[in-house]
Amino acid sequence: MPARFVLLDPAPGFYKLRLVKHGPWVPCRIYWRMGERDAKTGEQLDDDLLLADVAGQDTIDAASVFTGCHSISESEHRYLIKRRIHKMTNDVNAPENFPREAVDTSKLPPIF
């Protein structure tokens, strides 16, 4: 059996997470924002920051959300964003529109 490893520090990439227990999956992208540099000398004036773009809306410190993240592909990340946009315009009561609320399965319409 291959060895499993756990990332203890946030790493740039594409992830999904739930903002609350039993909530819908929300896309998250973690990336580096390079600090400001001096134009003449190239000396770094500001720190580089590791940020997280959660649900395409909130940009926050990556360390605050990384522990709940599950790694996904870029195509799945794009799918989650497109699905969320579709649900916002076509189904106002969809769980994707309320990412900070747990999904109550008894209130969902039947799947068939």
Image (tube, rainbow, N blue to C red):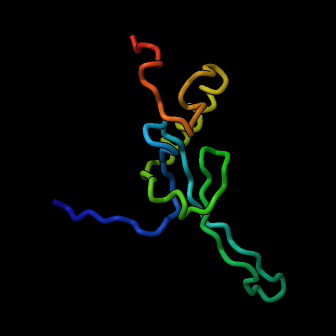
Residue at the far right: name it.
40
| Nearer-the-camera pick, 38 or 15 | 15
Corner quadrant of residue 97: top right
From this view, report whether residue 48 is shown above or below residue 42. Answer: above
Q: Is residue 2 toward the left or the right of residue 30 in the image?
A: left
Corner quadrant of residue 111: top left
Disc tally is 0
Q: Is residue 41 toward the left or the right of residue 79 in the image?
A: right
| Nearer-the-camera pick, 66 or 76 | 66
Give the residue at x 45% y 59%.
67
Q: Is residue 9 toward the left or the right of residue 64 in the image?
A: left
From this view, report whether residue 27 is shown above or below residue 12. Answer: above
Residue at the far top: name it.
112
From this view, report whether residue 50 is shown above or below residue 22. Answer: below
| Nearer-the-camera pick, 104 or 69 | 104
Give the residue at x 49% y 43%.
20
Give the residue at x 76% y 85%.
42
Give x and y (percent) for residue 75: 50, 42
Give x and y (percent) for residue 49: 64, 70
Give x and y (percent) for residue 60: 64, 58
Q: Quadrant of the N terminus?
A: bottom left
Q: Quadrant of the C terminus?
A: top left
Give the residue at x 46% y 19%.
108
From this view, report whether residue 93 is shown above or below residue 37. Answer: above
Q: Is residue 10 toward the left or the right of residue 2 in the image?
A: right
